[in-house]
Image (tube, rainbow, N blue to C red):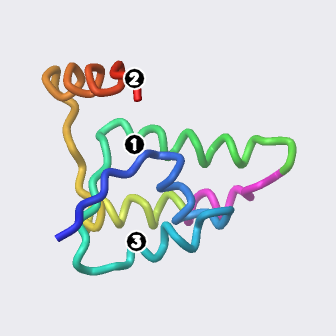
Amino acid sequence: MAAYFWDTSALAKYYHREKGSVFVKTLLETASYKHFISEATLIEMLSVTAAKVRSETDTLVKSDFYMFRKVFQQDVKEQTLLVVKLDPQVITSAQKLIAKPA
């Protein structure tokens, strides 16, 4: 079974159509895959969408923001997206991985 760990900017493409949305939707809607997000994504996702509402280009209207938020929260509640808690060991491991050059 494949497992994906979703970065907030990639995951946002599922809820708000933009370049790359079709690919993200295909992955997220494949039933045999598991999808993980960080606990931080719960906050970051709202920040990303609120910023789209506040942008000068009006990329997202307020009513869409509320729908986006509702669907995202439902996906978390139904465990379509599995939340990984950020304990100190996870943070340290992530920092070590990120610090390694390609």
Residue bounds of the magenta highlight: 58-67
* In-front residue for pair 1/83: 1
Instruction: Reply above or below: 56 against 11.
Output: above
Local secondary structure at mark 1: helix
Q: Residues within 10 Å of mark 3 (few under 14, many from 20)?
A: some
Residue marked by disc 2:
101
Q: Is residue 53 left or right of residue 72?
A: right
Q: Amino acid at mark 2?
A: Pro
**Gap between marks 1 and 3 measured at Cα:** 18 Å
CA neighbours of label 1 inside 10 A, class few (<14), some (14 to 19), many (20+): some
User: Can you identify the residue that label 1 sits on?
Assistant: 41
Residue 22 placement (x, y as % from top left): 57, 74
Of the pair 71 and 32, the residue shown nearer to us = 32
Which residue is identified by label 3? Answer: 27
Q: Is residue 47 above or below residue 23?
A: above
Labels 1 and 3: the sequence-earlier one = 3
Estimate the x, y position of residue 55 in percent, counting from the top left.
Answer: 79, 42
Q: Amino acid at mark 3?
A: Leu
* Sequence-earlier tag: 3 or 2: 3
* Image quadrant assignment for residue 73: bottom left
Q: Which residue is located at x 38 percent, y 51 percent? A: 6
- Mark found first going from the N terminus, 1 or 2: 1
